[in-house]
Image (spheres, helix red, strand yellow):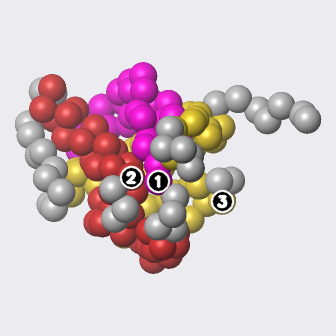
Amino acid sequence: MAVIDAGVGTDAHLQGAHDVVVAYHRSIDVGRATDGLELFTDDAVFQVKGTELIGREAIGRFLTDREAQTDRHTVHVIANPVVTRAGKDEVEISALVLLQVRQPGGHYVTERVLDTVHEVTRRSAGWKIRRRLSRPLHSAVPQ
């Protein structure tokens, strides 16, 4: 996965951070979720389905389990990304993530819309996700 590492204060600087977020989601969608592990810091915090995972080992277990779900085909659509904080070596990106899941007939339906925050930090190896927070955009509707 290519990661842009550009100068501070430029569009390329922000693009490098954004590209890491996109690359993580794309790794899941192309069936290679474990490839996304390299995009996280060693001490990363990762929220998923109401659970908080801490560190690459815990995140790696989640991504390994996800990659094993070979019958589940998804597309993560990142919508309305907003840079909410930017510094020399840190960028925070808030975005909606629409989780599309392929159905038996081949069409996709939106399973969830998540309100996410990705805190991305620049390390010697390029941009890495330090914190990924996610929660449903809307509360569940009582049935």
- Which residue is painted at 42% across and 22% down in the image? 80
Q: Nearer the viewer, residue 93 or 36?
A: 36
Q: Earlier in the sequence, mark 3 or mark 2?
A: 2
Q: Residues within 10 Å of mark 3 (few under 14, many from 20)?
A: few
Q: Is residue 121 visible?
A: no
In contact (CB < 8 Å): disc 1 and disc 2: yes
Q: What's the residue type where badge 1 is placed?
A: His
Residue shown at 51% from the left, 38% from the top: 108
Q: CA distance from mark 1 to mark 3?
A: 22 Å
Q: Is residue 51 left or right of residue 108?
A: right
Residue 98 at what x, y percent from top left? Answer: 51, 34
Residue depicted at x 47% and y 53%: 73
Does dot 3 land on a helix, a strand or a loop? strand
Range shown magenta: 73-99
Which percent across, then down, holds residue 20?
A: 27, 47
Tell me, yes or no, whether the two marked residues, 3 and 2, touch with CB atoms within 8 Å.
no
Q: Quadrant of residue 53?
A: bottom right
Amino acid found under the numbered disc labelled 3 = Thr
The residue that mark 3 highlights is 51
Q: Residue tagged by mark 1?
A: 73
Residue 56 vs 25, above or below: the answer is below
Helix, strand or loop at label 2? It is helix
88 relative to 47 in the view: left or right: left
> Is residue 32 shown above or below 114?
below
For the N terminus, the quadrant is: bottom left
